[in-house]
Image (tube, grey):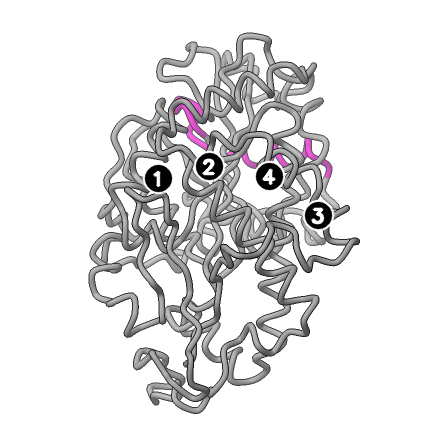
Amino acid sequence: QVPCSLQRRPHRKPMAGLPISLIVALWPIIHGLVVESSLLSRSSGSSLSVMSRRSRGKGNASLDSNWEHFVGCPKQPASRDRTWLRLVVANNHGSTALESVLMSSPKLATLCSAEVWQCEGRKLLERTFQKNPDLVPMDQVLETFSETWDLNRSVFLDKQTQSFPQLEGEDDVVRNTLPRRMKAHGIEKLRPAYIIMYKPLCLWTLSHLVTKEVFKDPRAVAKFELKRLQQQVQVYEKFASQGRAPLVLNYAHLIWHPDFAKQRLERYLPCLGSLDMDFVPEEVPGTGMKITMGTQSYGNTFEPVSCCGWEAARLDQGFAGKCMRSTQKGTNYSSQALVNGVNVSASLKIPLIDLLDEAEQESLEAAYRILDHLSMV
């Protein structure tokens, strides 16, 4: 496998060469990143305060005026308050690894007791309503989930990976029409929070399912990645503009820089307390979740360059890491990609990014630049 390139080009202006349509589509975010150039500072605390002040000026009628911007939940939430935590992570992109870390907190409630695949909310909705979960009204979604969540806990986890949640209609529900079971439990406020986690393209060898898809139709995989990244950027822009920016995580940081990921998770979700980056949840029958190794230990089994062509992050220098592009076609960094137990990585001789056309490559790199930046603040 020859990894993709996310290399920045210092000699180019930030938007040089980008199609006008892309600049227009991403302008609210790009403009925000330019204005908030102080976010490039190594002091993430001051960066967050700058963005928070900017967001407070926008206002948001659906959130309490004393809500802490850019924090998913307060350290000591009121006894009648809960947080609805939604994971915006594509399938086969590390959502289970992230979920297992979050499950190390006794204050997190999951949907695992419903015995649905991978404890995913989408699967529970499919089973309950026998139709496309995206068509289920939000009040019915929460009503269904509240039958499974442990309502005594502070944070309710909603993992939906097959397609990103619609993320519409939440405000009216969580503010005005809480499920009757939550009301009966004394819950008065339910606040939505979001974690966006993206996976660098060259890490495809870490997933057996994605590896199989790559060798069926590598261009389709590359286009899927582009679509998902663009959706994640849109989700971030939408909620950041409303003063409730999601936490953005890089999967490479989660497995290879666990201390950094832990710090950012705990800062965003202080109500969960200390998280264990190597936690192994107990197997729950009917979920298909049989985790035998913690996230940190899993990362330790792979050397970033040899497995994936990943240049590790230099966090003290503000460098998020990147996929390396081979200087010689056919160079293969990976010896880990297996399909049906057979190493087939050497048969892919070009980076996935090279299977996209020029405009698509520019769009992909633009999305990575934005998400890489947000994963460091």
Crowd tier of the residue under label 4, counting other residues whose Cα lies within 10 Å: few below 14, some 14–19, many 20 or above: many
In percent of width and height, residue 311 lies at: 33, 63
Residue placed under numbered mark 4 in the picture: 236
Q: Nearer the viewer, mark 4 or mark 3?
A: 4
- Secondary structure of residue under mark 2: strand
Q: Is residue 149 magenta?
A: yes
| Residue occupying the point 41% across, 74% down | 208
Q: Earlier in the sequence, mark 4 or mark 3?
A: 3
Q: Nearer the viewer, mark 1 or mark 2?
A: 1
- Secondary structure of residue under mark 1: helix
Tell me where residue 345 sits by quadrant. Answer: bottom left
Camera-nearest residue between 241 and 212 = 241
Are the two marked residues, 1 and 2, in contact with CB atoms closer than 8 angstroms?
A: yes
Crowd tier of the residue under label 3, counting other residues whose Cα lies within 10 Å: few below 14, some 14–19, many 20 or above: some
In percent of width and height, residue 96 lies at: 40, 53
Mark 3 residue type: Asp
Are the two marked residues, 2 and 3, in contact with CB atoms closer than 8 angstroms?
A: no
Look at the image and give the residue range highlighted in magenta.
137-155
Mark 1 residue type: Leu
Q: Is residue 264 magenta?
A: no
Residue placed under numbered mark 1 in the picture: 102
In this rendering, is residue 116 above or below 195?
below
Residue placed under numbered mark 2 in the picture: 157
Task: Tell me, for residue 134, which label it has, or none.
Answer: 3
Mark 2 residue type: Leu
